[in-house]
Structure formats: C-alpha cells, structure tokens
Amino acid sequence: MQVKLSTGKMIPIEMYKVRVVQKANLVPASQRLTAIENAGYNTFLLRTRDVFLDMLTDSGTNAMSDNQLASMMVSDDAYAGGESYYKLLDAVREILGFEFCMPAHQGRAAEHLLAKVFVKPGDQVLMNYHFTTTKAHFELLGGTVHEIYRDGALETTSTNLFKGNIDLSKLEKLIAQHGPKKISFVRMECTTNLIGGQPFSMENLRQVSQLARKNNIPVVIDTSLVSENAYFIKRREKGYADKSILEIVKEMMSYADVTYMSGRKSTCVRGGLLATNDRKIFDRLREWLPVYEGFLTYGGMSSKEVEAMAVGLREMCDIEVASSSADLIEYFVAKMLEAGLPAVTPAGGLGAHVDAMKFLPHVPQSQYTAGSMSAAIYIVSGARPMERGTVSMDRDKNGNDVLSDVELARLAVPRRVYTMAHMDYVVDRLKWLYAHRDLVGGLKFIEEPPVLRFFFGRLAALNDWGTKLTAAFRKDFGDEY
Ligand code: F0G
C-alpha cells in the first residue's frame, strides 16, 4: 500500500505489525572482503552470518503471516490422503479456478514434471523469457527454448509498463515454421524474473492464449509471482483499476491450460504446485509425481508448508499483501534514480535491479560485469545481491561463454522483511560505489560446474580489485560499517 504524505509525496506503508524479529549482523568491511574471497566472489557461497541484508532472493525468504504459522500447527502428517492437501485443493479451486492440483517440492520440480510430459527431443518451447531452472529442464529433455519478447523488452531504461509481453507476430511465425505439433507449449512467466521482474498485460495474455488455443497448443503460466503481476495489471492496465487482485488472478488463470508455481514467492512458503482443469494432463503429470516428488497429497512438501500454502494463496490476493514488496521496490528504484544510479525501469516485482553494464562500463561481459558488481555491492554494504547476467548462463556446446542479453545485479526485496531505512542505506552505499566504480574490475572462473554454474561456481578478482575497493571504503567509513 502507498499513502500520501502532507507534502504530496507517496510512500510505501507497512500494513502489518512486526511481532517477531531476527537479529541482523553487519560485519566490518575487512571481514566482508575475506568472506567474499572465501566465497569465490559468488554471493551464493556466502554464509548468512556475514550478510547484513539478504537480498539474494525473495524465494523462501518472505515473512509468513500469523495465520500461516497458526495453520501449520493443525497440519495433517499423513503419507496419503492427508487433510492438508484437501485444504490446498480448495484454495486452488477458489483462487486459481483449477479443478486438479498436485504439490511439488518447489517450482523447478514442477518444471521437471512438465518437461517429462510435454518436452521431447526436437520440440520447441516458446516463452516470454526463460528462467534458469526452466531452460535447464526443457533443454535437458531435448527441447529448444525460444524467447519471443517484444522489441524494447531488454532496454533497461524504459517506460514500457509490460516488458513481459509476448510478440504475437513472432509467436505466429514460430507456429507456422515448426507446426503446432512440435510446440510443447507457450509459457508466460508472471513478472519475467531475469529481465527485471517485468509483468505482462492481460490483453497480451488473452491474445497469446487465443492464438495458442486456436492451434491446439497448451498455454502454461508460471505463477510464481502471480499476485505481483496482477497488482501491476491493476495499477498499469486500462480497465483494471477497480478490479480486485482475486478477479485479476482468476481472469489470468482462465487463459491457461496448466499453471505451476514456486510457492516460495507470492505464497510465502517453501513448496510448489501444478494445477489444471484437464484431467488427461493431470493424469500424465501425476504418473511421474511419486517417482520424483512423493505421493499426490504431499508432493515432496512438508504437510505444514502445504497448509500454509493454502493460506498463502488466499492472502496473496489481499492487495495489502500483493503490494507489500512491489511498493517498497518502487520506492527503492525511485531513490536509486534520484541518486543518478542506472536502475532498471519501470520498477518490477521481486527486487530492484541495477544495470551493471551502465554502472561498470569498463568491465566487459567476458569478465562477468554483473558478477563483479554483485560482489562489489556486498563488499561496500553487506547487502547480498544476486548476479543475473553471463555467470547465470551456461557455456555452449563448444565451451564458449554465452553472453547474457542483460547484466543485472539483483537486489531482491523479500515480502514484509525489510524497511525503507534498509533501502535508503543500500542506495547510499551504491552511490558511494558509483563514485568509486573505477576501482572495480572483472572476474575469472576458477571452478566451474557444467550446469547452472552460478550456484556453485567460484571466481577470482582480476588484479586484486576487491582489496583496493575495501581499502578505499575503509578510508571513508573506517572499519565499523
Ligand atoms: N519460475 C520462476 C519465475 C522463478 O523465479 C523461479 C525461482 C522458479 C520458477 C523456480 O522455482 O526456486 O521454487 O524451484 N526463482 C528463484 C529466484 C530461485 O531467486 O528468483 P524454485
């Protein structure tokens, strides 16, 4: 929610009371340098004891509500037939409008099952933009991923309110080129993660769905950030201002044949699910569930989380919950822009993003611009960002780096966890870093896994720039902060 101050300025206001807190730790800059060196300049490999603000991700790190925690106490720990599942099924029917649902331990598990059922070698999978785990699963089973975003979607400074839209002429062309039978499905990702959490519009989804269904191609919506995408539709799309988040979510789902989600985001739990109205699709997906996840009524999740996901599905449709992170991100991005920093615009869901190629124009992509930037942000602030650039792309078959379309340092804003003061602090440190950006250099891999290398890969700073940056920081701030 946003409220207007007497000055006319809008600020994000917390529509919750904080009753339980966790102590945060801000270790000195010299310790942060040691920590990032030990982590191979990969923020995934930091320990949280060395992290002040954990902005790596909003996945599984959101604050749960009192009602979610209470629901966990009455969960039903049965291997089969547990009541918690039926509560989840009721919530899925009520909120998403799908008759059949199966839990999975997290979003990528749902992607794995989808890939098993829909993707064969030689198949084409069309989508607004890929997500790392999505692409990995579909390619592992022999599919080719096509990203068919509209022109301008990759521009990081933009006024395009729906950069997550699909280009209908590209969709038509690919259908004509490959034939509908070779197309596994069209996937729409709610707030395209890797290009800055950018939403798609209802109008675009409706048109994509019409075209796909006319050709008997299933439409799959990745609903990981569905409440945020719905909130953006309400705020940004003509005709939706007076609709509730629930009405918008329901309309979105009416254009999908299958939906899946990482429940770790909008629903603030740790889990995932798949849902559909098509009995045949459900049966085919269900065949694989016990092989990879578990029995239908828990799908690899703890029954406590199944209960809390049912509550989370309903709560995410409360506008005060749907807007909680989006409004703080909008504030965060506005502050960055005021400070002259190259933040991705418009502000999106899940976090604020900084264009590393604009921030560090002297660090080429071959030296992992966004990786350098993320490590540098950690050194000067103790906030832990995530690299979303070339490090997050695996090498091609010939062993060459695949340069990412964009190099972003992502500062995730988990729901109901951080405050405006935290955002102001990070912007201040980013401002300092921008003034000293010449001190930041590139990285090189010293240990590199072949698949999803960004998780465990280790890098080193070229020319020891981490030490020089830390020394300059300590000169200005001492070793306290
Ligand atoms: N789809 C989207 C759009 C996601 O953002 C994620 C995860 C997944 C699928 C996979 O779900 O993690 O539950 O297996 N995004 C996290 C992130 C990891 O940090 O953005 P998962």
Image (tube, rainbow, N blue to C red):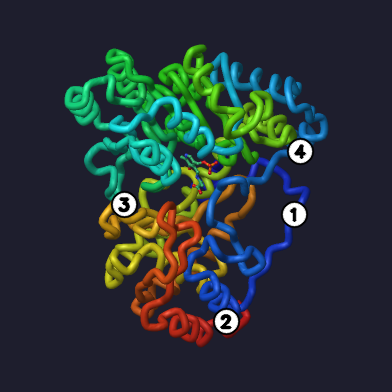
Contact (CB < 8 A) between labels 2 and 3?
Answer: no
In this picture, residue 242 sits left or right of residue 20: left
- Of the pair 81 and 442, the residue shown nearer to us: 81
User: Crowding at label 4, few (<14), some or many (≥20) Cα neighbours within 10 Å?
Assistant: some
**SS at circle 2:** helix
On the image, the x and y values in percent for residue 419 come to 61, 54
Q: In the figure, residue 389 lies in which quadrant?
A: bottom left
- Of the pair 372 and 425, the residue shown nearer to us: 372
Where does label 2 land, which residue? 30
Cα separation between marks 1 and 4:
14 Å
Which residue is depicted at the point 49% across and 71% down?
Answer: 40
Where does label 1 land, which residue? 21
On the image, the x and y values in percent for residue 145 come to 31, 38
Q: Earlier in the sequence, mark 2 or mark 3?
A: 2
Q: Earlier in the sequence, mark 1 or mark 2?
A: 1
In the rendered structure, which amino acid carries the disc numbered 4?
Leu
Q: Earlier in the sequence, mark 4 or mark 2?
A: 2
Where does label 4 land, which residue? 69
Count of numbered marks: 4
Where does label 3 land, which residue? 156
Asked if one can make out residue 319 in the rendered structure from this viewpoint, the answer is no
In this picture, residue 154 sits left or right of residue 6: left
**Quarter in which the C terminus is drawn:** bottom right
- Of the pair 406 and 11, the residue shown nearer to us: 406
Contact (CB < 8 A) between labels 3 and 1?
Answer: no
User: Crowding at label 1, few (<14), some or many (≥20) Cα neighbours within 10 Å?
Assistant: few
In the rendered structure, which amino acid carries the disc numbered 1?
Val
